Image: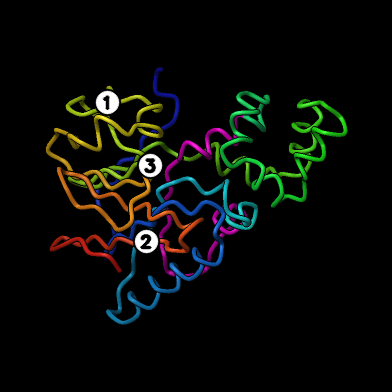
Amino acid sequence: MPALRTRTKLLATRGPIYAIGDVHGCIDQLLHAEQRIQEDCQLRNQSATVIYLGDFVDRGKGSAAVLEHLSRRHTDDLVRFAVCGNHDDAFLAFIRDGAGAQHWLDFGGMATLQSYGIDADYVLKTTGSMKTLVALAREAVPQQHVDFLQRLPVSISIGRYLFVHAGIRPGLELDNQTDEDMMWIREPFLSEGPKLPITVIHGHTIVPAPVFRDGRIGIDTGCYSTGLLTVLKVTPEATAIL
């Protein structure tokens, strides 16, 4: 599958970088994570860059609220970037033309539609029409949310760090990586790491605690089921959990 989404490269950032793991509709935990970042910055009188690692929708109850928060203009001192996760891409495909509809509904999409006031199960039982469900979703989801998802890059590079939702194909140069791998891959990336002179910071694969190994740092701690939304702080000196 060819690359379709953009890849962002930042030459420098102001202050530390904070990476936030998979949100999955957990708006309260997201706001709390941002508050912790703000407090850490104020303590050191620093500005900061925040990178969200994708999967903003599905599974949790507040997908609509998460997208509303991330897609609006902010007046604080945080510089925000985000990458696209596989769930975000699947939601966008559903809104666009109903592609992969049943698969998306089965792996968390029901909760996303519910957050927009749509009872997908009821609609399908009473109308038997996936087209009707897609049409209702198009009416309910603000264009601002759709635009936000469409603009998301698949990766962000800053120096020797690559921020991406799932990972990369080991040993393959970044220009040759596919969107599909960057949003979906598990093995062999989890076992082998990037096999490139970079550190990949990613989510996607749930772990009981953040994983530091083989040129990668995994920080998806399953917020929708555990309530734990992990924040990784990256400075020139070190990486550490906030």
In this rendering, the label closer to the viewer, 3 or 1: 3
The residue depicted at 47 percent of the width and 63 percent of the height is 227
The label shown at residue 175 is 1
The residue depicted at 41 percent of the width and 17 percent of the height is 1
Q: Name the element at disc 1.
A: helix
Residue pushed farthest bottom?
A: 43
Q: Please tell me in which quadrant of the rendered image residue 96 appears.
A: top right
Residue 84 painted magenta: yes
Residue wearing tag 3: 165
Marks 2 and 3 sit apart, C-alpha to C-alpha, by 14 Å
Residue pushed farthest top?
A: 1
Q: Please tell me in which quadrant of the rendered image residue 131 appears.
A: top right
Marks 3 and 1 sit apart, C-alpha to C-alpha, by 16 Å
Q: Please tell me in which quadrant of the rendered image residue 128 appears.
A: top right
The amino acid type of the residue labelled 3 equals His
Disc 2 vs disc 1: Cβ atoms closer than 8 Å? no
149 to 227, vertically: above or below: above
121 to 82, vertically: above or below: above
| Left or right position of 26 against 228 | right
Q: Name the element at disc 2.
A: loop
Mark 1 neighbour density, 10 Å: few (under 14) some (14–19) many (20 or more)? few
Residue wearing tag 2: 230
Give the camera-side residue of 7 and 125. Answer: 125
213 to 15, vertically: above or below: above
| Left or right position of 207 against 64 | left
The amino acid type of the residue labelled 2 equals Thr
The amino acid type of the residue labelled 1 equals Asp
In this rendering, the label closer to the viewer, 2 or 3: 2
Mark closer to the chain start, 3 or 1: 3
Which region is colored magenta?
67-93
